[in-house]
Amino acid sequence: MGAVLLLAVAWAAIVWSRPAPIRIAFANSLTGPSGPAGLESLVSTRLAIDEVNAKGGIRGRPIELVAFDDASSAETARANVQAIADSPCVAVLGHYLSTTSLAAGPGYKSARIPALTGTSFVDDLTRGNEFYFRAQTTSSLQGRSIAEYLRAVLKEPKVHLVHSRDRFGSSFLQGFAQAYEPGLLSITDLDIDPAGRIGPVTELLDARAGQSGPGVIVIGTGADYIAGIVKAVRRGGVKALIIAAAAPAMKAICRILSRSRRKSKIPVFSPRISTRRRRSFLTAPARRRRPSPPPIRPWRERRRVGSQPARMTPPGCWSMLWVAPTS
């Protein structure tokens, strides 16, 4: 009995002397449309924390990550704020989508909880909110960098810009329109209903039907809408070069285009390959055999904003999905 008591006292002493962990909330999309990307972020964040903890943590205190699933939903993200505020977490990492970050942002400000996102682009997220920080470019800068790339590398093609009538789409449109020739730009804006669903792309399809030549379609919406727009465009029979400005939806888009490619033999290729090869594919005469595109795969560009647009890879921190027109 005395030995057991001695062991219990020794164990209590060890636990008592162990420093309390620093808990950080990981508020992200672990389920829903952006669930796969959110889970990848969770795994990579845990790996980084494990490295810090293996070196002794922060001043001897280990870091502990507490996951909060926003289910890729603005309503769920807003509802999770109180649970995070009531927890011992001292800061928030998240969210993945701009829509969920915007929904939760006012709550973090009210609770005075600092939050950091590495993927939410919308300009308004950090305006007037001194508790929200961003390790990413804004949607207006993405729009501008895409416009500069189209001017410098693709020599100012006709562009049809599709954007959502929300804060993300409006800031993207502003940045793009300031850097592109108005005479070469047509615009379709899509409404967002109260349930968060984007409107039909009928106007885009009608506009494309009246245009000569394939041109380029630029999608300036949040990541949670891109896959649906691409799917609708494909079903409408539009064959054109598409640039999508957000990375989180790339896997869903690639799945859609993979099925489309098998059915209609639409060539799809990633901007991981060189600009020279992309140019040769797009400009090769129909009578010549065009080079075959590499396999479909998601790709994320992480270059410093301000690099020269004419370099081999596009400037800015934005992702591109290239769907080349058939001959």
Image (cartoon, rainbow, N blue to C red):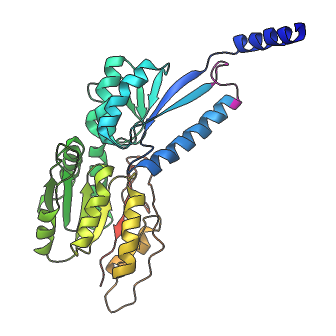
Q: Is residue 172 above or below residue 56?
A: below
Image point 23% across, 76% down: which residue?
237
**Where is residue 322 drawn, in percent x and y?**
36, 67
* Residue 114 showing in the rendered view: no
SS majority, magenta: loop
Locate residue 136, reporting x and y percent.
Answer: 39, 40
Quadrant where the image shows the C terminus? bottom left
Q: Which residue is found at the position 24% from the left and 48% from the top?
A: 172
The residue nearer to you, when weighing 222 against 324, is 222
Please say whether residue 21 is one of the residues in the magenta stretch: no
**Where, by quadrant of the figure, is residue 130 drawn?**
top left
Residue nearest the observer in this picture, 309 or 326: 326
Residue range in magenta is: 54-62
- In the foreground, 52 or 229: 229
Quadrant showing the N terminus = top right
Asked whether residue 241 appears in the rendered view, the answer is: yes
Identify which residue is drawn at 29% across, 70% down.
241
215 with respect to 248 (left or right)? left
Which quadrant of the view contains residue 219? bottom left
